[in-house]
């Protein structure tokens, strides 16, 4: 299952971020490790928000719900594997969100708010990985990264 591997990679990136911070701060804290792992997967909540709210009328979402209702789990997994990179209507998967997180990361660092450094840095690693993955899988970076919010013109 591709998406399972995808989430494992995000989790591993969170752990790498926690390890980097352990070296940087000179101490180990289990709360930071947990926060880094949670922060590295939190951005994918954007997908669920999309499916349950503003994207529920999208053809991609309707097809996913059709597969769920008919219990076609393998077809669903394959459909998500092959189609999720073309879902460019996610509100928070954009450069502006990444820039905002970088600012929050910087402020957290300046004010020695280590949990903020941990959380926001892990979220940044998630988005940077997604951008790199777009380039590797698609050969280009998805148009959603250059847009603020969701694409209100598509349905």
Image (spheres, rainbow, N blue to C red):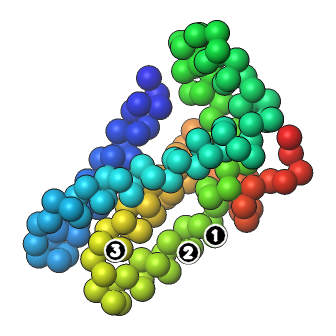
Q: Would you call the spot at circle 3 few (<14 residues within 10 Å), some (14-19), or many (20 or more)?
A: many
Q: Are marks 3 and 1 in contact (CB under 8 Å)?
A: no
Is residue 21 depicted above or below 155 in this figure?
below
Residue 105 rendering spot, x and y as whole percentages: 42, 77
Residue at the location (44% across, 23% down)? Answer: 1
Q: Which mark is residue 117?
A: 3
Q: Would you call the spot at circle 2 few (<14 residues within 10 Å), some (14-19), or many (20 or more)?
A: few
Q: Which mark is residue 100?
A: 2
Sequence-wise first label, 3 or 1: 1
Residue that sits furthest to the bottom in the current view: 110
Residue 110 rendering spot, x and y as whole percentages: 35, 90
Residue 4 can be seen, yes or no: yes
Q: Are marks 1 and 2 in contact (CB under 8 Å)?
A: yes
Describe residue 128's horizontal placement relative to residue 27 as left or right.
right
Q: Quadrant of residue 137?
A: top right
Is residue 104 depicted above or below 134 in this figure?
below
Q: Would you call the spot at circle 1 few (<14 residues within 10 Å), some (14-19), or many (20 or more)?
A: some
Residue at the location (66% across, 30% down)? Answer: 83
Residue at the location (45% across, 63% down)? Answer: 124
Q: Which residue is mark 1?
A: 96
Describe residue 110's horizontal placement relative to residue 85 as left or right.
left
Measure how far apart labels 3 and 1 are at the Cα level: 18 Å
Is residue 88 depicted above or below 35 in this figure?
above
Sequence-wise first label, 2 or 3: 2
Secondary structure of the residue carrying numbered label 2: helix
Residue 127 rendering spot, x and y as whole percentages: 51, 57
């Amino acid at each position: 299952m591709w998406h399972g591997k995808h989430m494992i990679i995000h989790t591993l990136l969170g752990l790498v971020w926690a390890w980097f911070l352990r070296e940087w701060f000179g101490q180990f804290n289990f709360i930071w490790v947990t926060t880094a792992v949670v922060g590295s997967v939190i951005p994918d909540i954007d997908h669920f928000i999309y499916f349950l709210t503003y994207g529920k009328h999208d053809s991609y979402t309707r097809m996913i719900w059709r597969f769920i209702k008919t219990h076609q789990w393998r077809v669903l997994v394959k459909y998500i594997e092959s189609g999720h990179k073309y879902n460019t209507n996610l509100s928070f998967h954009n450069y502006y969100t990444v820039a905002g997180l970088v600012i929050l990361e910087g402020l957290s660092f300046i004010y020695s708010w280590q949990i903020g450094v941990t959380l926001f840095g892990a979220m940044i690693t998630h988005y940077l990985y997604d951008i790199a993955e777009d380039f590797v899988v698609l050969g280009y970076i998805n148009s959603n990264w250059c847009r603020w919010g969701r694409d209100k013109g598509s349905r």
